[in-house]
Image: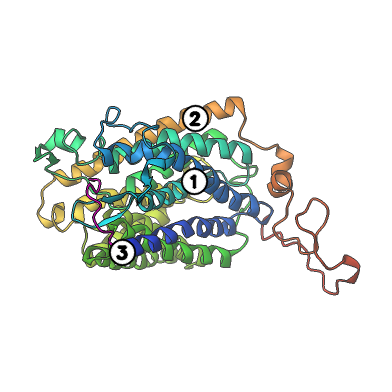
Amino acid sequence: MPIAADAPAINEAATAFMLVAASMVLLMTPGLALFYGGMTRSKSVLNMMMMSFGAMAVVGVVYILWGYSMAFGNVQDGTSDIAGIFANPFHLFGLGDLVTADGPRLIDVFGVDVYIPEVLFAGFQLTFAVITVALISGAVADRVKFSTWLVFSGIWVTVVYFPISHMVWGGGLLSGAENGLSATLFGATDGVASVLPIDFAGGTVVHINAGIAGLVLALVVGKRLGFGKVPMRPHNVPLVMLGAGLLWFGWFGFNAGSELAADGLASLVWLNTTAATCAAAAGWLLVEKVRDGHATSVGAASGVVAGLVAITPACGALSPVGSLVLGVVAGALAALAVGLKYRFGYDDSLDVVGVHLVAGLWGTIGAGLLSTTTGLFYGGGFRQTLLQVLIALISLVVSGALTFVIAMALKKTMGWRVSDDVESDGIDQSEHAESGYDLGGFPGGGRSSSIPRSTATSPVPQSEGANA
């Protein structure tokens, strides 16, 4: 990723494309807040949404200060990293070196004479870090302290996300660098691994990473009161579907934007993303119909997300037909996997494990099977698939182990759980002094109504959903 040495001209088309893509990915986190918020009980909807917005606040600050430097700082400047795991956190601290008196520093990210501002690339990567942390929150809905969650977000993104991001995308151990795992196993040519790991937009970095972290956190925090004994249905299904729609829209920035240019490959990525997502929704609904006799709205929305997750690592390597295959399998696998929490007794509240971990693993491994150039099913041999399995397992183990250490440390110090009374009454009032559906207003219940209660002609009671 060479730096522009002689101030070449900025590629305005690529820059405009990336500004739009980065904005779309940033929108995904509020979309996730709606998706997760609708899936919780009404007394916890604000807390659930605030966990996403809190992740934006914490991770956005941390990424600018030292996150980008840890993940990508060495690659741009050609400096050495630390054991292939992360770069110097202080090398580009605060990103001040990316803006000079002559304007933003330009980079040719893929070495093809397409220059964009490095601050834009940093901003694009910031949005990935934000949503990865926010994804984890769905595993521990309804029961954790907001303050502990914020502290966890800052520590986890530093200790887990930035190193894995560097290892996969920043020239570290899981990349195609000559000192990486692939080059060690299969050799290198001209300083590049002979078999390049496939993770176009974040199967390992985002979804396996967040999925296993969610599982570990759910185990450490423990089950919700009444888990497995009382129904805990989504309180607002239209909100879930709206959130899924926003995620789908933003995901085009996520996947196609990872090409960093408006070109032919970005166009293929767009189509592959659509194909896999549609097929995954169909796969999930088919499983529901056969197993339960009904195809549900929540199933359709969840199938959409499962397909988006699965195609994320593979979107630049597959054909449209291969994307359909990847997607339908992802939807079916995720639909079956969400029931594992009842079989094994862990309370993954909003199915982070079933959707993100399972679909993320399948998408990462499926890329090795279905890649049109090196995939096993296309005559490319076993090496790509083996490499995909290894990087998926390494990401899973590293993230899981480090998350466990962080979660246990916070459990011993700050504590994770709100009290049983608070959890029973609703975490929104205790943690935020607000109520998601109080339209009349009352002291401690959020911004009061401008219409006095005595003059309101049609008071609307607070909705408590089906099982709040």
Question: Mark 2 and mark 1: span between their CA atoms?
Answer: 20 Å
Q: Are marks 2 and 1 in contact (CB under 8 Å)?
A: no
Q: In the picture, residue 431 is in which quadrant?
A: top right
In-image side of 111 versus 426 (left or right): left
The residue sitting at 37% across, 55% down in the picture is 309
Which residue occupies the foreground of this view, 309 or 329?
Answer: 309
In the rendered structure, does residue 152 fall within the stretch colored magenta?
Answer: no
The label nearer to you, 3 versus 2, is 3
Identified by mark 1, the residue type is Gly
Q: Are marks 3 and 2 in contact (CB under 8 Å)?
A: no
Report the residue marked by disc 1: 60
Give the percent coordinates (x, y) of residue 137.
Answer: 53, 46
Identified by mark 2, the residue type is Ile
Report the residue marked by disc 2: 406
Give the percent coordinates (x, y) of residue 450.
Answer: 81, 66
Identified by mark 3, the residue type is Glu
Q: Are marks 3 and 1 in contact (CB under 8 Å)?
A: no
SS class, disc 3: helix
Q: Residues within 10 Å of mark 3 (few under 14, many from 20)?
A: few
The residue sitting at 42% across, 62% down in the picture is 250
Q: Residue furthest bottom?
A: 457
> Mark 2 or mark 3, which is nearer the start of the sequence?
3
In-image side of 125 versus 195 (left or right): right
Q: Residue furthest front?
A: 101
The magenta span reads: 1-13
Which residue occupies the foreground of this view, 380 or 10?
Answer: 10
Q: Residues within 10 Å of mark 1 (few under 14, many from 20)?
A: some
